[in-house]
Amino acid sequence: MKNIFLLGAAVSAVVVSCGTVQSLVQNTFPYTASVLVSTGVPADKEVSSTSTATNVQTWFGGNNNAKIKDVRISDAKISVVSPSGGNLSAIKSVKVYVSSSGTGERLVASRANITTDSSSLNLDLNDTGYLDEVVKSSGLTVRTVYELKNQTNSDMNLKIALNFNSVPAN
């Protein structure tokens, strides 16, 4: 009985330590993009906005020798920055693409038929495979394509927040 208890404790310790090691070696790094929705943007027409990375580029951009691999999108969110108290009720759909110098665009997140009056919304992630070459190349850009249900009464500033996960490369 004592041996079973000791074996169970040892197995538990190994499982917990493996989870701790995995969380220590897995990296999460953010990217944020700003999107201005002007009052003149017509409803029911897709509009595109492009933003160049600043924070991801600081981490790895342009460094093909960066010691990371298996980069994937792990989280995507859209939120209203201004006007204060604004909401997403005017937004019909949104698509978020990433690309960089020498790579094609990859759709990483989207949401269609948005029916919320909340100020923020998690986007659906698209399985794009690994994004190593996009993130490690220079000039990472995010292109946001949105469509309005109706024109806005005032300019609206949106924030697209993306999180990427990676693991250390050998």
Image (cartoon, helix red, strand yellow):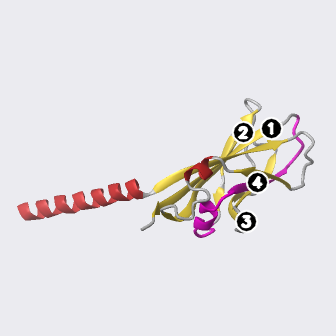
Q: Do the residues labelled 2 and 3 touch (CB within 8 Å)?
A: no
Three-letter code, disc 2: Val
Give the spatial CA distance, label 2 vs label 3. 25 Å
Left or right for 124, reference 1: right
- Answer yes or no: do the residues labelled 1 and 2 have beta carbons within 8 Å? yes
Q: Which of marks 2 and 3 is in front?
A: 3
Residue at image location 28% in from the left, 61% down from the top? 15
Q: Which is nearer the eye, 1 or 3? A: 3
Tell me the kind of residue under disc 4. Thr
The reply, left or right, for residue 17 in relation to residue 28 is left
Q: Which of marks 2 and 3 is nearer the N terminus?
A: 2
Rounded to the nearest angstrom, the CA distance separating label 4 from label 3 is 11 Å
Above or below, 115 against 134 in this view is above
Q: In this view, does 16 lie to the left or right of 39?
A: left
Which residue position holds label 4?
144
Residue at x 86% of width, y 48% of height? 149
Q: Residue at label 2?
A: 80
Disc 4 or 2, which lies upstream in sequence? 2
Crowding at mark 3 (Cα within 10 Å: few <14, some 14-19, many 20+) = some
Residue stretch in magenta: 127-153
The answer for how far apart the CA atoms under marks 3 and 1 are is 26 Å
Q: Mark 1 points at which residue?
A: 156
Identify residue type, mark 1: Met
Can residue 1 be seen in this snapshot? no
What residue did someone put label 3 on? 105
Q: Nearer the viewer, mark 4 or mark 2?
A: 4
* N-terminal-most mark, 4 or 3: 3
